[in-house]
Image (cartoon, rainbow, N blue to C red):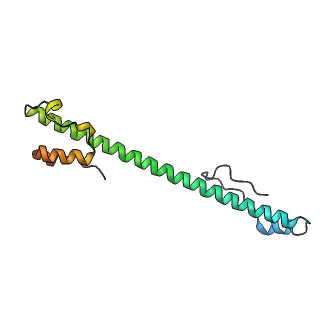
Amino acid sequence: MISPPNNPNSDEPQPQLDPLAFLSMVINREDAPQILNKSVEFVAWISYIQQDQAEAVRQKKAEAEAQQKVGIEAKACKILMAITIEHAKSQGLDPYKDLDNLQSKSYNQLCAYVKRRFPELSNRIPLYPA
């Protein structure tokens, strides 16, 4: 009979069953209906497993993309915080006393804060792909 593929992500060809050869082998048996029913169940099971594996791959890809986006946003935030802190220091401000808690802000909140508090820095705000 057929067996489930060992590694569906492999480039190696998977063994295939010739349906006509299978039917000709089964047709003359007394238990042909049971064999065919079990074969249909097995094919449905393989299809379910393949769909489940494909969904797991899609989820992993989406999670990796989300993690990458978080990392890019965090990097853009750190750059913008450094620019803001250095600018505040150059103006004689104490970043710990005179600025809002920058680390608690999202990238969009941080951009809005910098534009409002230090409009002269608007052209130095790093862009990151949203």
Nearer to me, 59 or 103: 103
- Rendered image quadrant of residue 97: top left
Residue 62 is situated, as x and y percent measured from the top left of the image, at 46, 51
Position of residue 41 in the picture relative to residue 94 (left or right): right
Q: Is residue 90 above or below residue 119?
A: above
- Rendered image quadrant of residue 14: bottom right
Residue 113 is situated, as x and y percent measured from the top left of the image, at 18, 45
- Rendered image quadrant of residue 23: bottom right
Residue 41 is situated, as x and y percent measured from the top left of the image, at 74, 61
Q: Is residue 86 above or below residue 67?
A: above
Q: Residue at x 42, y 49 (%)?
A: 65
Q: Residue at x 89, y 64 (%)?
A: 31
Nearer to me, 103 or 120: 103
Position of residue 28 in the picture relative to residue 67 (left or right): right
Q: Is residue 37 above or below residue 91?
A: below
Q: Is residue 117 above or below residue 37?
A: above
Residue 129 is situated, as x and y percent measured from the top left of the image, at 30, 52
Q: Residue at x 60, y 58 (%)?
A: 51
Nearer to me, 12 or 20: 20
Q: Residue at x 64, y 49 (%)?
A: 7
Give the position of the N terminus as an image quadrant: bottom right
Q: How many marks?
A: 0
Position of residue 111 in the picture relative to residue 120 (left or right): right
